Image: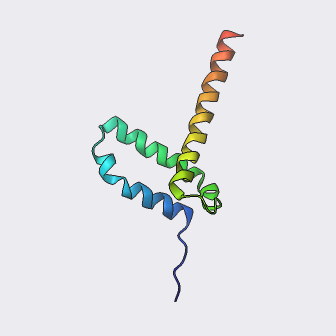
Amino acid sequence: MGRTVPSATQLIKLHQKELAEFRKSLRKEDKEIFDRLFSYAKFHSQAVGNAGRMYPMECILLAILIEMEKEIQELKNEKNKVSNP
């Protein structure tokens, strides 16, 4: 019997588990941020799974960056609304 290919969600969890020692050494507030970043990656698990030849961690980081960029843009838009009523 052959091996099955892990799902993107499984890959994300695997990489998060591999970074457990790193996470353990963070401060409490940084652990919360670390967990939030991986939740961003889980939000984009379909894209991570469809990436094909890319390394999973590259896709995870790109998914995190996409969500961070969206937050930055939202903050800029809010700032512009306040400064340009």
Residue that appears at 53% across and 47% down: 61
Identify which residue is drawn at 33% across, 47% down: 23
Give the x, y percent position of residue 11. 50, 62
Question: Is 27 on the left or on the right of 7, as rendered?
Answer: left
Image quarter in which the C terminus is found: top right
Splitting the image into 4 quarters, where does residue 5 fall? bottom right
Measured from the top left, where is residue 63 in percent x and y? Answer: 58, 47
Residue 15, percent from left and from top: 44, 57
| Residue occupying image coordinates x 61% and y 41% | 66
- Residue with the most extreme bottom position: 1
Residue depicted at 36% across the width and 42% down the height: 31
**Going by the image, does 77 lie left or right of 36?**
right
Closest to the observer, 43 or 4: 4
Quadrant of residue 71 within the rendered picture = top right
Residue placed most toward the observer, 72 or 82 = 72
Residue 30 picture quarter? top left
Farthest residue, direction left: 25
Give how far across and how far down residue 44 sits, in percent. Answer: 60, 52
Q: Residue furthest right?
A: 85
| Lateral position of residue 1 relative to residue 31, left or right | right
